[in-house]
Image (tube, grey):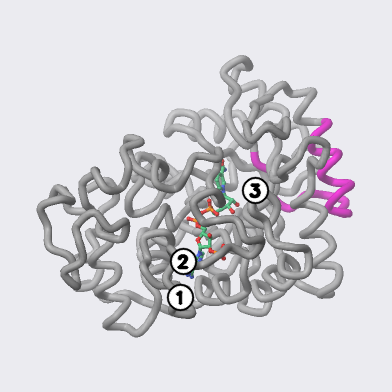
Amino acid sequence: MRMIGDVKIGPVGLGAMPLSIEGRPDEARAVATIHAAVEAGVTLIDTADSYHWHAGEAGHNERLIARALSAYGGAEVLVATKGGRGRPGDGSWTVNGDPRHLRGACEASLRRLGVEAIGLYQLHKPDPAVPFADSVGALRDLLDEGKIRMAGISNVGADQIREAAGVLGGRLASAQNRFSPAVREAADTLAVCADLGVAFLPWSPLGGISLSALDTLDGTPLTTRGTLDGAPPSTRDTLDGAPPSTRDTLDGAPPSTRDTLDGTPLTTRDTLDGAPAHTPRRPFQVFHEIAAERGVSPQRVCLAWHLALGPHVIPIPGATRPATIRDSAAAGALTLTADELARLDLSPGA
Ligand SMILES: NC(=O)c1ccc[n+]([C@@H]2O[C@H](COP(=O)([O-])OP(=O)(O)OC[C@H]3O[C@@H](n4cnc5c(N)ncnc54)[C@H](OP(=O)(O)O)[C@@H]3O)[C@@H](O)[C@H]2O)c1
């Protein structure tokens, strides 16, 4: 078990965003995915008021989670939602860190989730037009009033984590940043969280590794697999609508042109099976090797790698299918050996 504040959490959470944004599955499949997560021991579900697709359906993801948990009955789950972003419906994401907006957003989330207090409320992203301390101050007030039990922040730098901890009087429970084997810019914030006793929630923890796998859980090649709604994988599951081929890299370079985990240029290394070096899975060769040796998916190895980075790390992989969240949740029982971790280049940012 891991901790967020004083709440015990299973080691792997569920990132619910893909259940409500572009390419989302139908409601039955979405509910089945949430139920599969709970049955697999997931006790943290990450959401946001802005996890929706079309204009006018803010809170789609929160309502879905509330319905799914109500139908399940008796699930001990920490629902972690966020405020401070919006989606006008054209695929873009807006930012609003005004304290009055955050208060209104929190109250709307409370109603949608059907709870008296939100378990973990996170500022989705600092608003450059609003002093960060003012936005975090809104979370402090909501804590003081008992509308939220714990406060977190997201998309933040190391200094902002320290500043938020100060504004909240030491009550900062979590920080959520983009972090994965291929995207390590937030490594310093992971370390700051460890120092402060703050939970670190890596978002997009698979960071493209799911798209790097040539085969899916059921052995169907990813490139030919349709999504649940028939949308091609290239158009879904991105934060900002960017095609996967251009996201999740450190510098925005397509995966085919960037360096590997160990710094070797992608184009000069051999592949596992002699496949051309430009295949998307190439940067994750060792994840695939260890997965094959252990008889598990490379995604499970990736999540076990996250868990080995520190007891305060709780990855929140997305899923739109029961099978994927079941597989991801099983990473909590996969302990990588020192030798395997060395092969996976454990040191963040190395
Ligand atoms: N704070 C922020 O600004 C922010 C931004 C982005 C995301 N997030 C949070 O982070 C969560 C995760 O990020 P993400 O969904 O973008 O990316 P991700 O977790 O890196 O990848 C999700 C994708 O990986 C696949 N997958 C998951 N587990 C798998 C497994 N065991 N085997 C094979 N494939 C697997 C899923 O497939 P299927 O669809 O087939 O199940 C899904 O398409 C989001 O849901 C959201 O809660 C937060």
Where residue 321 sits: x, y (%)? 62, 70
Neighbourhood count class around disc 1 (C-alpha, 10 Å): few under 14, some 14–19, many 20 upward: few
SS class of the residue under badge 1?
A: loop
The residue tagged 3 is 22
The residue type indicated by label 1 comes to Thr
Res. 277 image quadrant? bottom left
Q: Which-is-in-front pick, marks 3 and 1?
A: 1
Drawn side of residue 29 relative to residue 4, left or right: right
For residue 197, say whether it is visible.
yes
Residue range in magenta is 104-122
Amino acid type, label 2: Thr
Q: Is mark 1 within 8 Å of ligand 1?
A: no
Dot label at residue 224:
2
Mark before the other along the chain sequence, 3 or 2: 3
Q: Amino acid at mark 3?
A: Glu
Residue, disc 1: 220
Q: Is residue 43 above or below residue 119?
A: below
